[in-house]
Structures are given as C-alpha cells and as structure tokens.
Amino acid sequence: MGHNEHDGTSGTRRRSSHWFAAEGRSGMLYRSWMRNQGFGAEVFDGRPVIGIASTWSELAPCNAHLDRVAEAVKRGVWMAGGFPLEFPVMATGETLLRPTAMLYRNMLAMQAEELIRANPLDGVVLLSGCDKTTPGLLMGAASVDLPAVMVTGGPMLNGKYRGQDVGSGTHVWKFEAEIKAGRMTAAEGHVAEGCMARSNGHCMTMGTASTMACVAEALGMQLPGSAAWPAVDSRRMEVAQEAGQRIVAMVEEDLRPSAILTRAAFENAIRANAAIGGSTNAIIHLTALAGRLGVDLPLDDFDALARAVPTIVDLMPSGRFLMEDFCYAGGLPVVLRQLDEAGLLNSGALTVTGRGMGENVADAVCWNTEVIRPLAEPLQPAGTGTAVLRGNLAPDGAVIKQSAASPALMRHVGRALVFDSPEDYHAVCDDDDLDVSPDDVLVIRGAGPKGYPGMPEVGNVPLPAKLLRAGVTDMVRISDGRMSGTGFGTVVLHVAPEAAVGGPLALVRTGDRVELDVPARRLTLLVPDDELARRRAEWLPPKSEDDSGYRWLYREHVLQADGGADFGFLRGGRGSEVPRDSH
C-alpha cells in the first residue's frame, strides 16, 4: 500500500500519518474502518488529510445550505491532492436557539477545538454562517493551531417588499414598530416577513453575520472577496472550491492561524469594522479570539483604532443598501484598499493566501460609489463608529454604535426607568398607563453573560407602544446585554461589570438621573457616592436556578463582556499535539 510518512517538502512526518501510516493493528484499524465508506487504499498514501468542520443544520436556517458548500470544498481538496473528510460541529443559529445562541458559542469553540485535535487532520476548512458560528470556529481553530481557512456561507439575496428593498432583522424592528403604531396590519406583517428571507444564507444587512464574515476576511482568515458573495450565487461555490485547494497548500507551507492572527490582523479587523458600519458584537468576538492567541487587545483599543476611520459602506442598519449591493460594488477588498491608501491598514499582515493583506487588495475596483463611498465622502465622518464609554455606571466599559444612533441623543440626561429583566419590560411596554416619557432612559439589566445567562441580543428593546403612536422614534436605552447587529437606535450595550455580579447597573433605581455623553465617552449615574455605597451594602446577588449541566458551567466560568464572554479556562492555546493511541 505504501504509506508515505513524509510531506514531500520539509521531510517531517504528517500529523495524519500517526493514524494512517501506523504499523500493525493500529494502522489496520484506522485504515479499514475508513474504507467502509468506499475510500480506496490510495487515499492513505501520505497526502494531507483535510477536515471540513461544518455547522450545517436545518435548525440553523442561515447555515442550512452548508452541506452543498462542503461538496464544493471537497472538490477543491481532491483537485489539490488532499483527502477531505467532513464532520459536524454545533450549529448555533441565532434565529431559533433559546435563550440565545451566544450561550453556546463557547461550547461550539470547545467542540471544534477538541474534534480537530482528536482526529487525524493536517488542516481544516471552517464552514460557518449565522452570527456565533464564525467566531466559535475561529476560536476553536486558533486554540488548536492547525492550518485553517474560513468559508462563510454568504448572505441571502436582498429582501423585496412592495417595490422596496427590505433588510433581514433591520426591518423586523421597523415592521414591529409600524404594527404597534397601527400603521401596518398583522396580515401585512405576515406577508412582509416572507419577503425578508427569500433565499438561503445569513442576514443580508450589515448585521453580526455579515460583519463577522467581513471581519474573518479582514483578519486574513478568509479568501479575499469571499465574505460578500450571496449564498445562492455560483461564485460562492467557486470560492469554496478555491478554499479547498488553498488549504492543501497551507498544510504544505505549515501556515497556521497563529502566524495570521497577530496584533496587526486585529487592528485591520477593527478598522474594517468601523469602515463597514459593522456590529458591536464584533467587539465581543474579537476580544475572545484575541484571548485564545495571547494577543493584547484591551477594550479601549476598539475606540482608539476606529476614531480615524469614517463609515464608508452605506448598508442597513446604518444606511440604505444590502449585502448583495455591497458584493456587486466590489466587496470588502475595495474597503481594505481604501484603508491601505489612507495609511490605515497593516498591509503586510499575513493572510491565508500566503501574501500580505495589501497585496491581496491592491487591484480592487469599486463599481458603485453610492454603496462603497470614497473616504473623502463618507456615510458617517471619522469618529462616529463604535464608541467605548466609561464612568461610574460602566467602570469596565460599555459600547454604543454611533452610526446607528440618533445624533440628538448623543448628549442626554434623563430619568432612569429600570427593569430587572427584558421580560419585565416586555410585560408592560404596551400598557397605555406606563409612566414613561421620551426623555427617560430605559435601563434593561439582568441580561449579561452570567445574569441571563448568555448575554442575549435584547438591549435595543422596542419603544413603549404609546410613545410609538405619538411619533417617537428613539430613546436612550442602557443594558448589560447585547443587540443584534441588524438593530438600530441610541443603545448603550455590554455594560461591565453586569448587574448579576454586582456591577453599578445593579444599583440604579427608577427615578435616578443618568447622563450619557458620547463625545466625552462618559456614562454616569448622577447619584452621590455615599448613596451608592448604602445601596451596595443592601444588594443581594440574584439566585441562580442552575446547579448542574452546561448552564452551571457557563455561569461559573464565563468572563465579563470586556473579556469577550469566553470561558477563563479556555484563554490561551493548547496546541495540536497528537493524542495517545489507545489501540
């Protein structure tokens, strides 16, 4: 059979050869059981074995087409002389999973890491789609540090309703407000919901799924231009096939995530996120990913690095267009080239192509300057990206997406109207007798990593129905939770420490005055220190109902938002050393 134990270039033994080139009973067992799938003996000739980690699931609608994407990856692997083997990992679909997919991102990362390490793989292709699958797979791959390339599943086609483009997620909030205000019937809403999701793929707004696809490309972990191709475009399959070919070469080159995911790559991703008007959730995921690699990335860097970057991509929820338009305008390479020409890109940062980022995007052309604007004519000026706030209400930080907020509310003082959970708010928000005014500040707590648990996307709660009927379109909202990247409004998020661990948010009472000053980057509870000390002495932590199972593990070990809400015991890498053979 001729089991070659060498890679043909460096002369070192392939990782997979510890299984498939093993002598005696062990090798016979490994090879024979693989052959029951119909693989011929020649696949064990020492060629690179490539895992395809797929988050395909019909319970994750955004990822339900990844089985077909995997077939395209396999074609590429075979073409390049590799041996592809697909395996499932947890699909954390935000659309159906309760209480929130974020609760399970760390589980996905653990599962991916352990499966990659425990199996006879030399490299891996990561297939993702919905919000948490992209960072979860990146975190797992970074921790095991075998050659890896990401292939996201692509956005849906633009939604269409009554002659206008509608965006997934973004128009959910808008249609809900219209129905509550009596300007849209429930029957019309039922028709509209089917118009938002008319093809395979993830959200076609610049929500978290699209943001993280672009972030993966900006980090150098995804092939240039591949973040934006629609899920049903044939070129999505072409780029998947190309990724299959490229991963075989990456194994030969021993090009690993640790060589790509450097501080320079994270700086590129942060600036790209600012330029595209990306989701605040990117902060949580990039922080967690950096922790896996030992890259120093404090929260304030997200503000500092983004301040010089204007928002130039005119996509919902900050703008008008959708991902299909972004793709046809030239996609992320155009954005990265503009950043490079302005001296805002680390052009030498290594990518999965084996080249620097600047070289990858040097020939990018913009085909629609309305969708991707020149830096000199931006959608939003520099300094209006995601801001990091601090103050006595958020000593470890909070964030606000300025491009999706109301300029008139960037400096605001109002009375706090406090709710201990999102459910408490939803129970009364439609009541006509709710004591609320447009100047109030809605405080939604109990939504942090430990408190919910899982830090759900609930910060941008809908406005009270009576205010919507009166024509009010925005209010300041403050939460220790997150919000969907498709959402909009003047919403302060990720307040740390969260209320459930005794953060200052736990001490706020209805009637207190809260000051938001985004230009000064301050979030202040206007209550004397001695009164806050008195309240703290009276505060009791909420009782947890979880005394076993994964939720218990999560509550016990999850870090706060400024730590990326990862598990503390998963920070740092554990490598790809071949496990012991028990046969």
Image (cartoon, grey):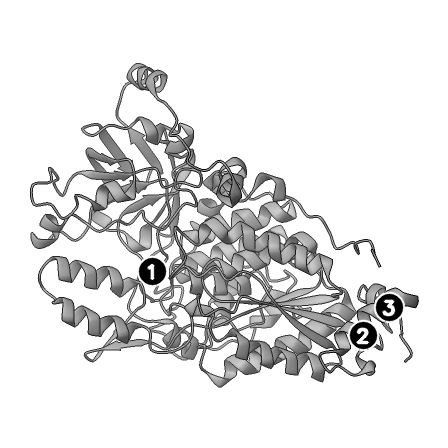
User: Judging from the image, what secondary structure is the residue with disc 1 in?
Assistant: loop
Identify the mark nearer the N-term, 1 or 2. 2
Mark 2 vs mark 3, CA separation in Å: 8 Å
Q: Position of residue 375 (x, y in %)?
A: 40, 64
Q: Check disc 3 and give the amino acid type.
A: Gly
The residue under label 2 is 32
Give the Cα separation between the discs numbered 1 and 2.
49 Å
- CB atoms at circles 1 and 2 under 8 Å apart? no
Drawn side of residue 209 relative to residue 340, left or right:
left
User: Which quarter of the figure has residue 217?
Assistant: bottom right
Tell me the kind of residue under disc 2: Ser
Q: What residue sits 16% from the left and 53% below the top?
A: 473
Q: Nearer the viewer, residue 160 or 227?
A: 160
Quadrant of the drawing holding the N terminus: bottom right
Q: Amino acid at mark 1?
A: Thr
Category of crowding for the residue at label 1, using alpha-carbon neighbours closer than 10 angstroms: few (below 14), some (14–19), many (at least 20): many
Residue under the image location 45 percent in, 38 percent down: 546
Q: Secondary structure at mark 2?
A: helix
Q: What's the residue at 82%, 53% (across, down)? A: 580
Residue placed at 73% from the left, 62% from the top? 119
Secondary structure of the residue carrying tag 3 is: helix
Q: Quadrant of residue 327 in the image?
A: bottom left
In front: 41, or 285?
A: 41
Q: Is any part of residue 344 visible from this angle?
A: no
Residue on which disc 1 sits: 486
Judge by depth and name the residue closer to the eye, 165 or 321.
165
